[in-house]
C-alpha cells in the first residue's frame, strides 16, 4: 500500500541562493509543488492553517485526496529529508488533515504523503512517499 516515486532534476540553484531559512523553505516548497504537478498531481490548496497545524499541500492524485508534507534538506548532515517527519509531526499533520476534512468532506480515499527533497550535485532529488504514515 505504501510506495514511493523518486527522481532527480536540476533547478535547485534558486534554493541555494536564498539567505534565510524561511525563504529557502518557500522556494523548496514551490519547487516541490511544481514537481508534483508535473507528475499529474492536482493541487487544491497550499499552506492550509488549522488549529492543529499547517498542511503544506492538499490535492488529488487520481481519485485520492492527499495531504502532502514537503521537507527539503540542503545537506545530509542531519540525515535525509524523509527523516524530518518524526511521529509527533505526523500526528499534527494527521490532526490537521482530519480538521480539513470536517470543513471539506471528501467521499473518496484519503492519504498522508511526504515529498522529501534533498540537494545533490545534479539538483533536487525528489522522493514522493505516498501513504507515508497512518493517522492515529
Image (cartoon, rainbow, N blue to C red):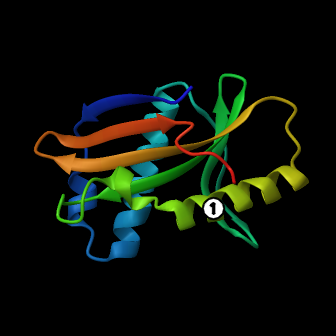
Q: Is residue 57 above or below residue 79?
A: above
Q: Is residue 58 left or right of residue 78?
A: right
Percent across and percent down for residue 68 are 56, 47
Percent across and percent down for residue 98 are 78, 54
Q: Is residue 53 above or below residue 87?
A: below
Q: Nearer the viewer, residue 122 or 66?
A: 66
Name the residue at the left extreme.
121
Q: Residue at x 85, y 38 (%)?
A: 106
Q: Quadrant of residue 56?
A: bottom right
Q: Is residue 126 above or below residue 86?
A: above
Q: Is residue 113 left or right of residue 7?
A: right
Q: Secondary structure at mark 1?
A: helix
Percent across and percent down for residue 18 are 27, 68
Q: Is residue 18 left or right of residue 91?
A: left
Q: Nearer the viewer, residue 81 or 33?
A: 81
Percent across and percent down for residue 123 are 20, 43
Q: Quadrant of the C terminus?
A: bottom right
Q: Residue at x 89, y 43 (%)?
A: 105
Which residue is denoted by mark 1 in the rendering? 91
Q: Residue at x 66, y 22 (%)?
A: 62
Q: Is residue 25 above or below residue 125?
A: below
Structural crowding at the residue carrying mark 1, measured as other residues with C-alpha within 10 Å and reported as few (<14), some (14–19) or many (≥20): some
Q: Quadrant of the N terminus?
A: top right
Amino acid at each position: 500500500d505504501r510506495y514511493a516515486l523518486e527522481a532527480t532534476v536540476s533547478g535547485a540553484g534558486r534554493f541555494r541562493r536564498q539567505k534565510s531559512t524561511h525563504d529557502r523553505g518557500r522556494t523548496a516548497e514551490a519547487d516541490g509543488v511544481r514537481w508534483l504537478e508535473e507528475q499529474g498531481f492536482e493541487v487544491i490548496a497550499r499552506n492550509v492553517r488549522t488549529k492543529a497545524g499547517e498542511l503544506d499541500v492538499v490535492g488529488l492524485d487520481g481519485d485520492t485526496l492527499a495531504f502532502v508534507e514537503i521537507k527539503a534538506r540542503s545537506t545530509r548532515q542531519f540525515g535525509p529529508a524523509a527523516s524530518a517527519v518524526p511521529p509527533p509531526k505526523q500526528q499534527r499533520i494527521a490532526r490537521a488533515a482530519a480538521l480539513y476534512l470536517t470543513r471539506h468532506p471528501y467521499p473518496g480515499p484519503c492519504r498522508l504523503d511526504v515529498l522529501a527533497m534533498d540537494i545533490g550535485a545534479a539538483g533536487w532529488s525528489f522522493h514522493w512517499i505516498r501513504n507515508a504514515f497512518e493517522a492515529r
